[in-house]
Image: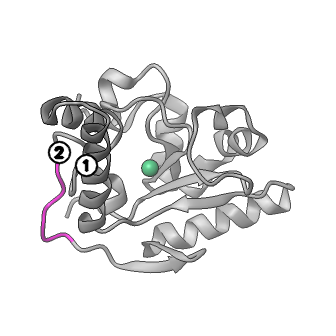
Amino acid sequence: MQNKYLMLVSKDRPMPKDYVPVLDDVYGKSLEKTAAFMLKEMFEAAKADGIELKLLSAYRTPEYQKEVFDRSVNQRIAEGQSYEQAVAETSINVAQPYESEHNLGLAADIVTPQDYDVYVDFENTGEFAWLSENAADFGFILRYPKGKECITGYTYEPWHYRYVGPYDARRIYNSDLTLEEYLGAY
Ligand SMILES: [Zn+2]
């Protein structure tokens, strides 16, 4: 059976509609069971190093994903864009239902305790520096790196971490590849 932790889900690769992850609670949200356990281990290791991490967003149902997408489209239309333009521009940063790793339960948006939203300057924080150095040991990779936009289809997201398991995370980290390249899917 295919390793579910390496499942590639993106804008042109929707997840199977009948796929239901086995979830566990973590910091008031949920993630796939093993990912939840490893995230907790990672946050505790960070804390031991004096770094406080905050889980901003984890598992999202496909229904909620649709809400997020539609909200952004409607807001753009209210600002005067055409429907087509609003959908195109929303698609740059927001995934459709079944096309987000958050729907798999394997993605975590991580920020500092002071943050209530994601932002690119997160890359200049000590929290990001800690994650860059240690996330792979806990099975997480920076999923949408800088300079790889045309491969991942996503702009740089220093806050978005994807669980793939420690073995593959270390190999991906050491090779400097995206998940697409690592899986030979690009
Ligand atoms: Zn994310």
Q: Quadrant of the N terminus?
A: bottom left
Note whether 147 is above or below 60 in the view shown. above
The residue lying toward the viewer, choosing from 88 and 143, is 88
Q: Quadrant of residue 123?
A: top right
At x 58%, y 64%, the residue is 39
The quarter in which the C terminus is drawn is top left
- Magenta: main secondary structure equals loop
Residue occupying the point 57% across, 50% down: 117
The residue that disc 2 covers is 13
Badge 2: few (under 14), some or many (20 or more) residues near its Cα, within 10 Å? Answer: few
The foreground one among 117 and 153 is: 117
Residue type at the position of mark 1: Val
Residue 14, magenta (yes or no): yes
Residue 9, disc: 1
**Distance from mark 1 CB to nearest ligand 1 atom below 8 Å:** no
- For the residues labelled 1 and 2, say whether their Cβ atoms are less than 8 Å apart: yes
Residue 24, image x and y in percent?
46, 80
Q: Is residue 75 left or right of residue 17?
A: right
Q: In the image, is 38 to the left or to the right of 97? A: right
Left or right relative to 7: residue 43: right
Residues shaded magenta: 13-19
